[in-house]
Image (tube, rainbow, N blue to C red):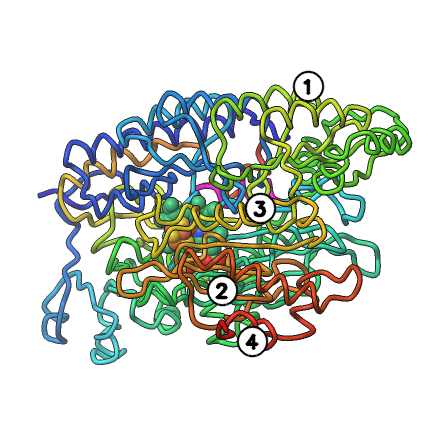
Amino acid sequence: MYVYDSYDQQIVDQRVVQFKEQTERYLAGQLAAEEFLPLRLQNGLYVQRHAPMLRIAVPYGLMTATQLRKTADVSRRFDKGYVHFTTRQNIQMNWPALEDVPEILAELASVQMHAIQTSGNCIRNTTTDQFAGVVPDEVEDPRPWCEIIRQWSTLHPEFAFLPRKFKIAVNASQSEDRAAIRFHDIGLQMVKNDQDEVGFKVYVGGGLGRTPLAGQEINSFLAKQDLITYLESILRVYNVHGRRDNKYKARIKILVKAMGVDKFSALVDKEWQQIRQGSNQLTDAEIARVKTFFTGIHYETLADQTEALATQRFESAAFDKWMARNVDAHKQPGYAAVTLSLKRVGYPPGDATAEQLELMADLAEQYSQGELRVSHQQNIIFSDVKQSELFALWQTLDANGLAEPTVGTLNDVICCPGGDYCALANAKSIPVAESIQEHFSDLDYLFDLGDLDLNISGCMNACGHHHIGHIGVLGVDKKGEEFYQVSLGGDSGVGAQVGKILGPSFSAEEMPTVIQKIIDVYIAAREPEEPFISVVNRLGLAPFKERVYAKAN
Amino acid sequence: MQKLIKNLQLIDNDGWLEVASAEEFEQSAQPLVPFKLLDELGSDLLATKDYGILFEVSDDYEALIAAISTQPLVVFEFEKFADGRPFTFARELREYHQYKGDIRASGDFMPDQAAFLYRCGFSSLQCRTEQDAQTALAVKDIVSVNYQADMEQAEPLFRRR
Ligand code: HEM
Ligand code: SF4
């Protein structure tokens, strides 16, 4: 866990003072609403359907138990006692009062948290794999690189008024992409070259929203000391050439598409040659300094508990299911990574109450060295649990509704706040998620379906990542009524692709049945063990369409 | 009305006056020439005295670079405070082209942008109102530590910590 020194702390503290002054000026009528807008957005403050919405940064999804407790405390004192974990690994509160925000930020700053650049047309929170640092197959831990990017992008003077928001994600796993890097403005894949040196493959121009596009490669190997100067070059090209006449065409993806990736990368190179050797070139000392913060987890020399776990799984079917879906392999023998599910049926996906946050904080201290992560699937990860303690941890989680054994299944729905909270929504999304979860409540059935991403957004802004769900659901408005458009074949991982629309949209009531029909086609067509996405890729949309739109007889 | 911040002081103006024709250029002691007018004035006339260039975001930046030599002033006119192109323009002018003259922000920028403007190489601010100018001076230094290398601090924090 990166720990602030006096500089980091001073920046965050002074930022609170700055925002307090701006808020006071706004409340006193000395700052026009139009001008306060970008200033508050850069502190994560939207104005929403019911109240302002505050988005708190969780850099690359990593938090301490202390920070989580503070979040619980703040949500209780200034909000309604619950929070929402987002698809970009951040935390949202839906009901704070504008006047309270400076105080909230001051509280957060006391535990090294902030809301800097969590919205607005600037560089947002850099995200990564929720299992970073513990997965067996990663090139190296990506989090130091995320932290280096965080520092570079924080209050960057040149890139605070970009054409549009800008999102960066880093992945280091060699077999999977849990960070959806191809759907970010910049995606960085850590790689090794022939000389065994670590560097980055750089993708640019990915994104969701109205024009979903997978990012394209512009550099197959960027040496690590060049990371910042190269990012700076990309941002410069974007800041000058990105479109500003139409907000829906302002993302870098549109620029890269219009210009062509070759011309774009030539422009980046031209910038880069001028600054590459400059003072922003990273030093070995800095890379080493930042890395030291991510080696703080102390591992005991343990053996894998294969047999003991097998016995426990044999004795408890519920534990067995949880182990199968919610527990992942760890590079360190005797340890495991555990996903706490925030997808209990009947509760909005990604929501957690203050009591749950506090419980998770206690458990993180007891079982996982006081740290936890947020995943872009809107769950919580304990990354360093001893295998010998899995059973005890599971019992407590289960008793508190945090052990829904459905991680990665159809019921692990990614879902935006939708029409219940969001002013931009065309339709509600949470109730649709719920009705589908209820329909598929049979665990054995869910297990049998295996890995299946169901993503739901309440409008084409795509906060719920519907384009890259194996099944995507998008809320649309038809003459003032809420309807849902379904797409199939989206993939956020290594096979990065945007889903294809099935056909005309459905009412909310039809949705569980529609999903069931899609699943029926899958089950009938699959080879043994074949995942849903592979069947969709193999068969195309036709058989699904036929089934779903068949006339009842 | 003191709306100009120069050398961190509030002043009325420092003499530069926007001109709209060759005639006005000839009559002015300190002409500020809209970028689009440069061609029309021609190099012979321009060579007769020091002048400043007034650049709008929609003007051609590459052409500005070609036109820049020893002019003492370049003014970047903000069309809208949300249009951040001048931040990069100023920075490149200093960083790539070693421009040493005064770089001035003018037009629709916010006092809250003052700190970032200075950090990107701006050296004077023609604010919208006197109130704005006072606010800009008051809030400019609230955040006093920065991670990045910029035009006020040549080394990024990581080389200094
Ligand atoms: C409730 C208030 C929210 C508002 C007003 C809002 C607004 C928006 C808008 C306008 C876009 C489209 C941006 C573009 O295409 O350029 C967007 C995209 C996005 N938002 Fe939200 N959002 C909200 C909440 C959330 C939440 C709760 C999440 C996470 C669950 C989220 C995650 C995202 C993501 C991942 C994208 C897609 C990024 C991309 O286009 O590449 N947002 N949001
Ligand atoms: S997808 Fe649309 S409805 Fe959902 S949170 Fe984003 S803007 Fe709101």
Residue at 79% x, 27% y is: A386
Q: Nearer the viewer, mark 1 or mark 4?
A: 4
**Labels in figure, total:** 4
Residue A103 highlighted magenta (yes or no): no
- Residue placed under numbered mark 4 in the picture: A546
State yes or no: Cβ of the residue under disc 2 lies below 8 Å from any atom of ligand 2. no
Decide whether the magenta segment is chiefly helix, strand or loop. helix
Q: Which residues are magenta?
A: A146-156
Callout in the foreground (4, 3): 4
How much space separates mark 1 and mark 2, taking CA atoms? 43 Å
Q: Are marks 3 and 1 on the same chain?
A: yes
Residue B93 picture location, percent across and down: 41, 60
Which corner quadrant of the image does residue A291 belong to? Answer: top right
What residue would you read off at disc 2?
A486
Name the residue carrying label 1: A366
| Badge 1 and badge 2 both on one subunit | yes
Quickly name the residue at label 3: A377
| Numbered disc 4: secondary structure | helix
Name the amino acid type tagged 1: Gln
Q: Position of residue A26 (x, y in %)?
A: 20, 36
Q: What is the distance, in whole Å, between disc 3 and disc 1 at their CAs? A: 24 Å
Which structural element holds mark 2?
strand
Label 4: how many Cα within 10 Å (few below 14, some 14–19, many 20+): some
Which mark is nearer the camera, 2 or 4? 4
